[in-house]
Amino acid sequence: MNYKQCLEYLEHVQAQGIKFGLDNVRTLLSSVDNPHQKYPSILVAGSNGKGSVCAMLTRILSLHHYKAGLYTSPHLIRTEERIQVGKNPVPPESFCRLLSLLKEKIEQLIERKKLSHPPTFFEHMTCLAFLYFQEQNVDMAVLEVGMGGRFDATNVVDPALSVITTVSMEHKEFLGESLSQIAFEKAGVLKPGVEVVCGVEKPEAYATIKKRAQEVKAPFYGVFENGKECLVHRGSWGYSFEYRSDSHTYKFTPALHGEHQGKNASVAILASERLSPNWGLETEKIIQGIETTEWEARLEVISRSPLILLDGAHNEEGALALREYIQNFVPPPLVLVFAVMKNKEIEKVADILFPLTEKVILTRFPFHKSASPQQIKDRTLRYRDRLLLEPEVSQAVPKAVQLAGEGGSVIISGSLFLAGEVKKLFPRGNFHP
């Protein structure tokens, strides 16, 4: 397949939806000689902060001259962004070659009745990542778990370390109606005897994960337990932090904005400490990794005049982190460009963010699960006086810039899919009408 055919094939696969279970992935990986077993991996699960922690760990490993593979989701502009070695995405030619190989194997397995149905989009991408990392002879693969953990496609690996960042109410239709149920699904990445680093702070979720670790005899390390803590220092335009582990105090100022990134960094630091005996990770390079990690669409400043911040907050926990930053560092008047998936808790996110604004421009991104501006409005009618509807992102962003004026601020948030659409439409930052 050429590149265009690859994207069309994946678009067709994506339309098939989500199917839980690991049988398909294991069968497909077995047909290509189990590439995921050829190198060690770190599994990073959680509701928020997974991508940032993965990016930090990859950067830390790279600074120690290890060849680190990084697998994350979703992508912002190009599908290949999900699969990187160091800072380099899988090249289009490798992407097409490996996807063509997987397509051929899948057709053979279905014909031989080894597969009852084709793997999902995420399963395709996960298997492709495993193959590419094997080809690149990576020293370590850092894998962001997609949804949940127990039945996620990444969970076929036997990791060198398991990490759980946070747990919040999300994907309730798939993961459960309570924090403990969702935490149990996240804890599905825990493996017997494999150390787990847990950054979860909510007591109910934390207790569930710790109990599961005890059941599978996985050594458990809480990021914020037994005196370990992250101290916050606020400056004029951001934060610096101190993380006190059992063995060291780390002082750092992340390149990534927001108080929550101090906690994400703390998770990455403790994970690095647990890896260090076998990988020789140095304190100075761990701090350097935290301070030089770049990760797009996480409180990313994409313009200074006016101030435009791009953030992928899509659930209650993410919206709270964004609100905290806005209240401390973002000058009014504030205009919010907002788009979101239909299945998100739109009312809760709106209650957190909309009261901060002068105007909210409701828009949508080109994805079948995207809520229309009218659907968002119908669910947030209490804010009707400040709502404007603009279905096209290409029009919504310039309108927000115009409304905010030179001294105001624009926040673009609600989904990483929206962030990707903005980056695609305005690659050179020409946001003005």
Image (cartoon, rainbow, N blue to C red):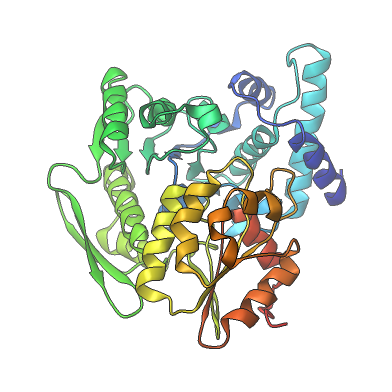
364 over 369 or under it: above or below: below
Q: Quadrant of the C terminus?
A: bottom right
367 over 179 or under it: above or below: below
Residue sitting nearer the eye, 71 or 234: 234
In the image, taking residue 104 as reference, residue 23 lies left or right, namely left
- Residue 357 lies, in percent from the top left, at 50, 69
Residue sitting nearer the eye, 294 or 284: 294
In the image, taking residue 314 as reference, residue 192 lies left or right, namely left
- Residue 239 lies, in percent from the top left, at 31, 70
Q: Residue at x 75, y 20 (%)?
A: 117
The answer to whether residue 18 is seen in the rendering is: yes
418 over 161 or under it: above or below: below
Q: Residue at x 55, y 48 (%)?
A: 346
Going by the picture, which residue comes out furthest to the top?
A: 113
Picture quadrant of residue 56: bottom left
- Residue 9 lies, in percent from the top left, at 83, 39
In the image, taking residue 428 as reference, residue 274 lies left or right, namely left
Going by the picture, which residue comes out furthest to the left?
A: 227
Q: Residue at x 17, y 49 (%)?
A: 228
The answer to whether residue 55 is seen in the rendering is: no
- Residue 95 lies, in percent from the top left, at 73, 47
Q: Quadrant of the N terminus?
A: top right
Q: Residue at x 58, y 85 (%)?
A: 405
